[in-house]
Image (cartoon, rainbow, N blue to C red):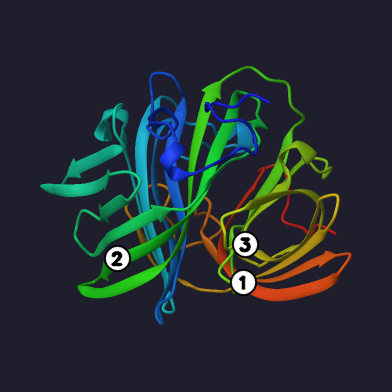
Amino acid sequence: MKTNFSTAVSEVTLPSDMKMSDLVMEPGKYSYEGNWAFCRFDHPHLLGGRIGFGRGEDFSEDRGWAKPGWKAAGRDSHYRIEILSRDGGYLYSCSGEENDLKIRSDAFSHAVHGADRELLSVEGYPEMHWKMASPEGSMDVDVIMEPLVFVTLPDNIQKNTTFSMWLVPCRLHGQITIDGVASDIQGTAFLDHPRLKKQNNSPREFGCYLYTPVLLDDGTYFFSYYADFIDGEQNKDYSFGYHVDANLNVSSYRCESMKNLRFTGEHQVERADMVFADDDAEIHLSIREEYLPVKRAWGGNAASADKRKYVIYPQLFTAEYAYRDASGESRQSGRGLLEYVQSDRRPYTVHS
């Protein structure tokens, strides 16, 4: 299957073998691109976060949203710093014009300037240095991400675009400062690079997707998507899982089912149970929300202290992971940060 990258679906690529053309953003060629890191920290107070940025056109219609996530029309740039602490979430979002985000085509280099300071600087490869800040100076991120192994995911065929993405687990370390308090952190980032190309397709109407990257207790990684159509039937072309073991070997799985998808009163995922399989084994993954209030949300139209109005709220979760094959069963726990997107035409009811 073709993708918007030079790599093929499920192709595994070491950082040293990644082509710069598959890493950099090319706004003249693609309608949207971004870089988003879903993070879990090994820290007593700062638990995780999502940081990232994008550039291009709104594609809310492909997700069944009645209202655009960013702008009614045109192209823009946007970035987010969403840090989740035991006190609650500190959620900053910024949206500007497309040319606010400066990029280079020959190097992994991105920058946003404003408020008489540098607000975003993401430079270098394969060791990537991320620096992000809110304009008023109340939140700063200064971290290094070291990619381990890249996986090219299957395409998501949408109404107006073809959605391609690679994903790479990264080691992460650095410093986060909130309201003048600096904390040294380390942990894991699941970094993804979505790349969308305009294309008129005729898919069935979008229902939802659930993205669940997990850091397992043994230090390995499992990341998965479940997707369905508006009538609730599973979209098998975009339901899958990948496990990365301690030696960076990658195994792929098809998603067999999702049950017990339940929501809180704030329209957040409370729990879900999924089964993945290949020809030799099954993986049972059960996730549960780690509830946190919103401590502060500011900066743009995506931000809201009401989780029901927040555009794709970042949710921490814990996981129970069971691997079953002919030799028996092994079980362990994990933790992650999920993303759930649902069509506006679907109510928040139990998926059984």
Q: Give the farthest residue toward the right.
A: 326
The kind of residue on which mark 3 rests is Gln
Q: Which of marks 3 and 2 is nearer the N terminus?
A: 2
Residue at 52 percent of width and 26 percent of height: 6
Q: Where residue 20 sits: x, y (%)? A: 38, 31
Mark 3 or 1: the one toward you = 1
Q: Where residue 162 sits: x, y (%)? A: 60, 26
Q: How far apart are the two marked residues, 1 and 2, measured between alpha carbons?
A: 22 Å
Mark 2 lies on a secondary structure that is: strand
Q: Where residue 3 sits: x, y (%)? A: 59, 27
Mark 3 or 2: the one toward you = 2
- Number of marks drawn: 3
75 to 246, vertically: above or below: above
In the image, 282 versus 62, the foreground residue is 282
Mark linked to residue 268: 3
Q: How crowded is mark 1: few (under 14 residues within 10 Å), some or many (20 or more)?
A: many
Mark linked to residue 174: 2
> Would residue 72 be seen by someone viewing this image from the given angle?
no
Q: Mark 1 points at which residue?
A: 334
Mark 1 lies on a secondary structure that is: strand
The kind of residue on which mark 1 rests is Gly
Quadrant of the image containing the N terminus: top right
